[in-house]
Image (cartoon, rainbow, N blue to C red):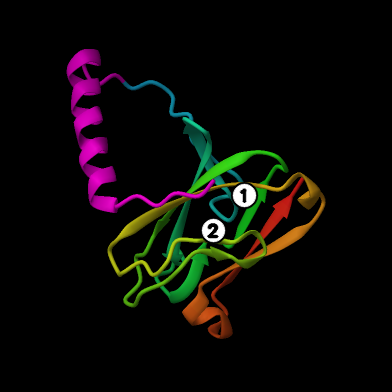
Amino acid sequence: MKTRRSSSLFLAALVAVAGLAFTACGGGTGDSPDTTQGGGSTTTMGGHANGNTLHVIGTDKNGADNKFDPKELDLKAGETYTVEFENTGSVAHTFTIKDWDVDTGLVNPGDTEEVEFTVPADAASKSIKFVCIPHEALGMVGTINVS
């Protein structure tokens, strides 16, 4: 199953939930469920209603356009994931996994789109590419390692 959500609706809901949480809980400082593996070079994961949430940025951590950060994701076969693709670049980008028919469509600079997918069970022990369709030839490519 694949879905897309507008970044503005997502942000509005996030602000509303955060406001309620701080009001109800007093803004406590509990441990965050998010962890980053490999010093930010691989998957960022956290809890999500129907799987794991992956945050991918449309430029690398040094601000270079036409790069993904992280450029390598470690996923598990049979698991459902939601990719939050944030375009911090200066031109439109996509997050696309051609082998699995996953695509955010064009995401304009400053916008965020989500796409949800389930890693096929037969993808275990494989490496799969994710790309930006308009910038694949320029090297905007990443790798999904499936276990």
Secondary structure of the residue carrying numbered label 1: loop
Figure quadrant of residue 27? top left
Q: Residue at x 44, y 49 (%)?
A: 3
Q: How far separated are the C-alphas under marks 1 and 2?
A: 10 Å
Residue 4, position as x, y percentages in the image: 40, 52
* Amino acid type indicated by mark 1: Gly
Magenta stretch encompasses residue 134: no
**What SS does tag 2 mark?**
loop
Residue placed farthest to the front in the image? 1
Q: Which residue is mark 1?
A: 38
Callout 1 crowding tier (Cα within 10 Å): few <14, some 14–19, many ≥20:
few
What kind of residue is marked 2? Pro
Q: What residue lies at 50% left-to-right and 35% top-to-bottom?
A: 46
Q: Nearer the N terminus, badge 1 or badge 2? A: 1
Residue 26 among magenta residues = yes
Q: Residue at x 51, y 66 (%)?
A: 68
Which residue does the image show at 64% across and 59% down from the upper left?
100
Q: Quadrant of the C terminus?
A: top right
| CB within 8 Å, label 1 to label 2 | yes
Mark 2, residue position: 70
Q: Quadrant of residue 128?
A: bottom right
Characterize the local packing of mark 2: few (<14), some (14-19) or many (20 or more) Cα atoms within 10 angstroms: many
Q: Quick one: 70 or 54, which is closer to the camera?
A: 54
Q: Toward the viewer: 74 or 76? A: 76
Residue 37 in picture, x, y percent from top left = 60, 45
Q: Which mark is residue 14?
A: none
Q: Position of residue 55 (x, y in %)?
A: 46, 50
Q: Compared to 98, does 23 lie above or below?
A: above
Q: Magenta region: which residues? A: 1-28
Q: Main secondary structure of the magenta part?
A: helix
State which mark lies toward you, 1 or 2: 2
Q: Would you say 64 lies left or right of 137 here?
A: left
